[in-house]
Image: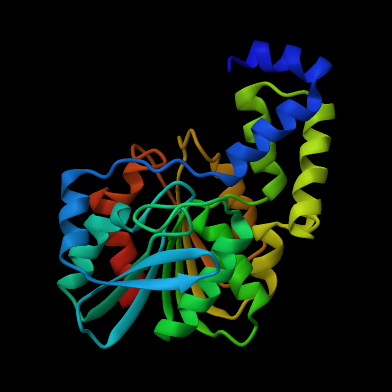
Amino acid sequence: MHPSVIKTISTVAPGMVVSFAYKMLTNPQVKKLRDHETKILSQAIQEDFPFKNFSIKLYQWGQGTKKILLIHGWEGQAGNFADLIEKLLQEDYTIYAFDGPSHGYSSSGKTNMFDFTELVGLLIKKFEVKLLVSHSFGGVATSFALYDNQDIQIDKYLMLTTPDRFTERIDDVAASIGITNKVKALLIKKLETATGRDVGHLNVSDFVKSINVESAMIIHDKDDKVIPISRSRNVHANWSAAEFLEVSGTGHFRILRDASVINSVLDFLNS
């Protein structure tokens, strides 16, 4: 529906628009992988992992002594890390990745960030990793998982862009579909009722203050049109363990494939 239509409906049938916006937030769209990404997935050892009502697709490459978990973003999937996986395979790594609930080659169904977060915590423990790389919303899920699991100790964590406040995600959706502030308030209430969480307290910049990460880095493109760099900067300002690298010319998605960014990731992980 066009934003102008949604705005009109918001005044006469706000419940209908809340349901539409809620569906957008809880039903990720599966995006097609590039041929190169599909090829990398075909080279992995694959496992179907039962989680809640989902069958989660797990992947493993390599048999190195350094174990790392890659956490994709919302509406992303493990194959998005193909270029980084290729480089890690040239070094002494065992690489783990997964497709989140209702993402990639995992089974489909209604899901939310809390399912994603719970799964990340489980997989960090399952694979016994001390190294993490996340992209986009993967940073929300991972920082929240580490916040919720204070027994997890991580040596190095690298975020390739990150949102900050969950309310900003709601603002982004509201702006994209044209809902009114009244409907946005009803949407927040519906989310909080469904999840039992106060969305106003779901902030990466708060989580990172008390997670057990020895060394961290955030890389973000200054021209990112999906997540403004200001959000990563605020996370960095609240994270004493983190350094910040600002890049340009990669945008939000190509940052995963950019050679200079991948070299920076490897330099950080290997230092």
Q: Residue furthest front?
A: 53
- Left or right: 216 as drawn, with respect to 235: left
Residue 246 placement (x, y as % from top left): 44, 49
In this rendering, the answer to whether 196 lies above or below 8 is: below
Say which of 42 and 165 sits in front.
42
Determine the image quadrant of residue 62: bottom left
Image quadrant containing the C terminus:
bottom left
Picture coordinates of residue 149 (x, y %)?
A: 63, 80
* Residue 224, percent from left and from top: 46, 37
> Where is 183 relative to 129, above or below?
above
- Residue at point 37%, 42% (across, down): 253
Q: Is any part of residue 33 visible from this angle?
A: yes
Coloured how? rainbow
Q: Is residue 90 toward the left or the right of residue 70 in the image?
A: left
Q: Quadrant of the N terminus?
A: top right
Residue 240 visible: no
Front-lying residue, 94 or 245: 94
Return the residue nearer the eye: 99 or 72: 99
Q: Which of the two residues, 155 or 81, is positioned nearer the viewer here?
A: 81
Identity of the residue drawn at 40% across and 43% down: 30
- Residue found at x 33% / y 63%: 265
Q: Residue at x 63, y 61 (%)?
A: 114
